[in-house]
Structure formats: structure tokens, C-alpha cells
Amino acid sequence: MSAPLDRLSAGALGWLGGNLDHFDPFAAGAPSAPLGRAKAALELALLCHCAARLPDPTDELGGAGALVRKLWQDPDLPRLFADIPTHGSTYGLVYAALAPDAIDDTHVRATLAGLDARVLSPQGKSAYQRIEVRHYADKAGVRHTVEPYAELLPDSPLVAFRAAGPGDPASADGAPLTEPQAYGVTHTAFYLGDFGRTVPGLDGPALAHARDLVDRLLVHCVEHDRWDLAAELVLTQYILGSEPLDTPSGAAAVECLVRAQRSDGAIPGRSAALRADPSAPAAEFFAKAYHTTLVTALMALVVSSPRPS
């Protein structure tokens, strides 16, 4: 592991491990809104799921893994999804897809059995949404009717989105894409490439376009200290077959994250403009910092690991 990635990984994992009580949706001080309570737990499970598949899994996620195993066997977790308007079944699908091995999966199987069939259908969904559903449905082993990835690629954000040119109103600060579009690019890569486990199926002009788009986005993120998106884009570079530290934009983004990381390991927000107040109460600081810190840990672990053969 390179020195910058090692620093990012060790610091971020240390901070996450020291704040596991905030990931527990049933602990005292957990967010009151069901969405916030469920989202943090699901994201921690994603980190554990991806880290466990690496050739040399880290020992620093032992506590996180134990918490995920406990939560995934708690009947109250899937019940929490029912209180999330419009997203309950989607969260249930993600919950089933990220279930750890060697647990009592009674509640996972019940959740899958109770999924709204419309969630598993392509009807009314964009190419991006279909790719997301297919990724998690395949991982959960549940039948669906979403088209193969190859049929969805031409209309996906990685291929269909075009960077804004001079005078195009992509955003007020001159970003190549709007923020939702940029996250659509990164998440599409995550799903197609299974967070670095497989190739995303792009080649030729489509791959060149995607790499160029990601490079432009990274340059903008570094210029504006948009830490969360920068971490996701570095991981996207890796999924698209580049070695991020060998690219000017990827190396600059990693250094940007190193500068942003606090001495306790946290990345204190999605961007410099949205950073948490250091004096904020612990729960408030966690709410602003945990996602970017977790994504940074995931990026550093995956990018520094050997590619699957």
C-alpha cells in the first residue's frame, strides 16, 4: 500500500472503529429518522462486505463486522425499512444483498419474500436505476426482470453523460456535471464493476469517454475540495482499469483527501464548504463525517489491493 493510501486507510478505519455506536440504529443517540438510522448501518455493511473479499482482508474491521452480524439477525432492522417512504423495498433488497456469511438468515429470507415485485422490474426506471437493481438483486440471489448490463450500458451515466462545455450551465461553479449526475457516474461504475471485483464491460470509445469524464470531474473536485466525490471518483478510476496514483488527477485527489483528514482519522464532511464544526456534538459531527470517511476507507482498501485475476 502506498504511503498516502496507508495513511488514509489506517486513519479512516480507526475513526470508524471508534464510532461504531453511532452506526447502530437502535443505540442511544441514533438519528430519529428511519432513513438516517438505516443508511449508516447499510453503508457499514457495504464496507465490511467489500473488505472481506479482498486478497488480504484487514483486521481493523473486526468490531464493525461483529456489529453488522448482530444487526442482520435483529428482526427490528428490516422492520425499520418499512418506515422509509418510497425506499423501503429498495433498502430491503440492499439489506439482503449485503447479508454476512454464516448468520441466521431467517429475517433476510423473510425480507426477500416480502419485497414489492415492482422493485425487481425495469418498468419506470432509468438505465442507472436498472443497473442498481440488477447489481443488488444478483448479489441477493433473487429473480428479477432487469435487462443484461450490456443492453443498459449505452444509456448509463458512464456513457451517456457529456461534460459541460464553455457556457453550459452544468453548475454555478463550472463543474463538468451536476452533483447528482456525478454521483450517477460513480455509482454506475461501482455496480458494473462490483466495487472493483470485476471489469465493468466498457471498451473502445465508451471506455475512453468514461475515463475522460472521470478525469475532468476529479480535477474539479480537487480544485473545490469536494472530498466525498473525489474519493468515489478515485475508486471509479480504478474500476475503469486505471491506476489512480499513476494519473495526475487521481494522485492529486488522494493528496487532497490526505490534507482533509483530521488527526483522529475522520474526513470531516463531504467538502470543505460543508465540513462539520469541530466543536459540534458527537452525533452531529458523525452525521456529517461518517459517509466520506467510510468511502475514503473503502477506496483506499480497494485501490491498494491486487486486482482480481
Image: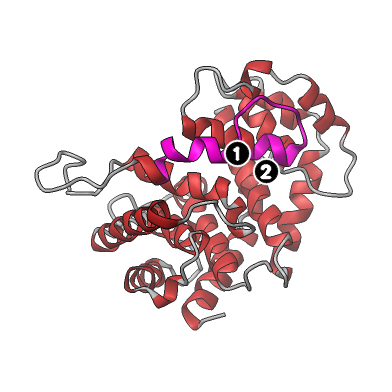
- Crowd band around label 2 with a 10 angstrom C-alpha radius: few (<14), some (14–19), many (20+): many
Q: Quadrant of residue 258?
A: bottom left
170 lies left or right of 12: left
Depth check: 230 or 284 in front? 230
Residue 246 coordinates in the image, percent (x, y): 41, 77
Residue at the (38%, 53%) spot, across then down: 210
Residue 273 coordinates in the image, percent (x, y): 27, 52
Q: Which residue is mark 1?
A: 30
Helix, strand, or loop for circle 2? loop
Q: In terms of secondary structure, what is the magenta stretch mainly?
A: helix
Magenta segment range?
A: 135-158
Q: Is residue 161 in view from this perspective?
A: yes
Quadrant location, the C terminus: bottom right
Label 2 with label 1: CB-CB less than 8 Å: yes
Depth check: 281 or 131 in front? 131
Q: Amino acid at mark 2?
A: Asp
Residue at the (37%, 73%) spot, across then down: 247
**Does residue 194 lie above or below 108 as drawn?**
below
Quadrant location, the N terminus: bottom right
Q: Which residue is mark 2?
A: 24
- Crowd band around label 1 with a 10 angstrom C-alpha radius: few (<14), some (14–19), many (20+): some
Residue at the (64%, 42%) spot, across then down: 42
Q: CA distance from mark 2 to mark 1?
A: 7 Å
